[in-house]
């Protein structure tokens, strides 16, 4: 199997028709001080792509902030995303150049949340067998095909450890364009829920010269698949209504 074929299987992995989840986002600064944010999120597969919306529940300074994204199947069509800020009562569109920005002060970017088009990269297997948490993995290198992709994601190159048994990414090393930084990503507490393999904990750490600058941990507290979700939940008006 080629590196591209492996990544195609990762991209096509079954993730349910809908997702409803509650989660916790933990932000950890270089002095190990922690801040927690609670979220409620929904995702729905539609005929031409995937729609997702997330609402911040707490703390008070981010409560009712919401993020809506449309990930279109057509690779020639740019994904759409918006951030609603209740303090300003304003919805901001996230343009392509903004997708490399931090999502709500975390180490995850908007591009990390929305995912990437696999056709935008060239792939190669840099290691045919490596073990992560007892599971055998391929190590795949992804290189953007164009400067536009680098600008949009902020990333020059990515190494991803893909589990051979379930085609799930469990570890990553990302070369960041700005500031000569490296991001280290990991997926833990992997469970099969309603027929879907889920990493219940993901961590992204930003480093410079091998020193940790900041970390973010995304923890799924509860998750359910294939529940009926109304289309109106994924419209801009829903962002302002809040959850």
Image: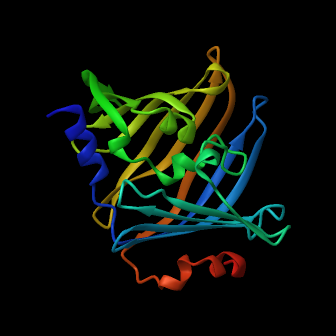
Q: In the visual, does 87 lie left or right of 74?
A: right
Q: In this view of the protein, which residue sits in the foreground, 199 or 114?
A: 114
Q: In the visual, does 231 lie left or right of 100?
A: left
Q: In the visual, does 101 lie left or right of 188?
A: right
Residue 44: x and y in percent read 42, 72
Residue 200: x and y in percent read 47, 52
The residue lying furthest to the left in this view is 1
Q: In this view of the protein, which residue sits in the foreground, 16 or 90?
A: 90
Vertical order, 127 against 58 (above or below): above
Q: In the visual, does 165 lie left or right of 92?
A: left
Q: Name the residue: 62% across, 56% down.
A: 24
Of the 4 image quadrants, the one containing the C terminus is bottom right
Q: Name the residue: 31% across, 36% down.
A: 162
Residue 28 appears in which quarter of the rendering?
A: top right
Residue 205: x and y in percent read 60, 32
Q: Name the residue: 75% across, 35% down.
A: 29
Residue 164 visible from this viewpoint = no
Q: In this view of the protein, which residue sits in the foreground, 94 or 68?
A: 94
Q: Give the tally of numbered discs.
A: 0
Judging from the image, the colouring scheme is rainbow
Q: Name the residue: 63% across, 24% down.
A: 207
Residue 216 appears in which quarter of the rendering?
A: top right
Of the 4 image quadrants, the one containing the N terminus is top left
Residue 40 visible from this viewpoint = yes
Residue 175: x and y in percent read 52, 25
Vertical order, 214 against 114 (above or below): above
């Amino acid at each position: 199997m080629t590196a591209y074929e492996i990544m195609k299987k990762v991209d096509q992995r079954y993730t349910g028709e809908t997702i409803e989840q509650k989660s916790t986002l933990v932000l950890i600064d270089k002095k190990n001080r922690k801040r927690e944010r609670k979220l409620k999120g929904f995702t729905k597969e539609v005929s031409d792509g995937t729609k997702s919306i997330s609402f911040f529940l707490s703390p008070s300074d981010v409560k009712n902030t919401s993020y809506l994204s449309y990930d279109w199947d057509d690779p020639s069509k740019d994904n759409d995303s918006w951030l609603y800020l209740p303090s300003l009562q304003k919805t901001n569109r996230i343009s392509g150049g903004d997708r490399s920005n931090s999502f709500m002060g975390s180490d995850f970017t908007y591009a990390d949340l929305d995912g990437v088009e696999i056709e935008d990269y060239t792939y190669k297997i840099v290691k045919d067998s490596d073990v992560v948490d007892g599971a055998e993995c391929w190590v795949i290198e992804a290189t953007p095909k164009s400067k536009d992709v680098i600008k949009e994601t902020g990333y020059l190159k990515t190494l991803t450890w893909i589990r051979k048994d379930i085609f799930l990414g469990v570890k990553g090393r990302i070369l960041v364009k700005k500031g000569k930084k490296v991001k280290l990503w990991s997926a833990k507490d992997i469970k099969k829920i309603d027929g879907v393999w889920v990493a219940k904990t993901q961590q992204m750490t930003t480093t410079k010269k091998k020193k940790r600058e900041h970390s973010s941990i995304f923890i799924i507290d509860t998750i359910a698949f294939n529940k009926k979700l109304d289309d109106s939940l994924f419209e801009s008006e829903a962002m302002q209504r809040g959850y």
